């Protein structure tokens, strides 16, 4: 489980780790602070490079009941909660290294 990993924001390069998880059929869960954060994480996981098989994509049943407003720099009125959303993956059909280098 990767809590609030921010796989979409580029602070850390998740590309190789995500490719290994998908290609080795390792189950993984990623939580998000907000719906927008979650949407961006799902876009990364389902992009042409990874094509992860999504098992679930929904509000987390374990999300914090306490809401915060303005936790993101992008939108000061965005509602956020710890572990608000989650997405689970297992396997998929990631691009092979030779396909990546051909592009």
Image (cartoon, grey):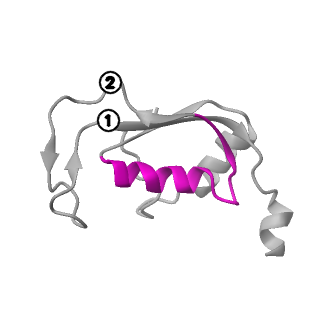
* Residue 79 screen position, x and y as percent: 20, 49
Return the disc, 2 or 1, that comes first in the chain's sequence. Answer: 2
**Residue drawn at 73 percent across, 42 percent down:** 92
Q: Which residue is mark 2?
A: 62
In percent of the image, x 41 and y 48: which residue is there?
Answer: 38
Q: Residue at x 80, y 71 (%)?
A: 101
Q: Which mark is residue 35?
A: none
Q: Residue at x 32, y 24 (%)?
A: 62
Quarter placement of the C terminus: bottom right
| Residue 75: % across, % down | 22, 64
Q: Is residue 94 left or right of residue 99?
A: left
- Would you say residue 92 is visible in this rendering? yes
Measure the C-alpha gap from mark 2 to mark 1.
7 Å
In screen coordinates, is 30 left or right of 97? left
Task: Examine the rendered structure and indicate whether residue 41 appears above or below residue 59.
Answer: below
Left or right of 50, for residue 37: left
Camera-side residue: 90 or 76?
Answer: 76
Residue designated by label 1: 83
Span highlighted in magenta in the image: 34-55
């Amino acid at each position: 489980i990767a809590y609030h990993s921010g796989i979409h924001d580029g602070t850390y390069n998740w590309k190789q780790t995500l490719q290994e998880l998908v290609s080795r059929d390792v189950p993984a869960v990623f939580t998000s602070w907000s719906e927008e954060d979650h949407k961006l994480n799902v876009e990364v996981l389902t992009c042409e490079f990874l094509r992860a098989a999504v098992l679930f994509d929904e509000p987390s049943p374990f999300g914090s009941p306490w809401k915060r407003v303005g936790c993101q720099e992008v939108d000061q009125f965005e509602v956020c909660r710890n572990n608000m959303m989650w997405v689970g993956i297992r396997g998929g059909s990631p691009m092979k290294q030779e396909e990546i280098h051909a592009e």
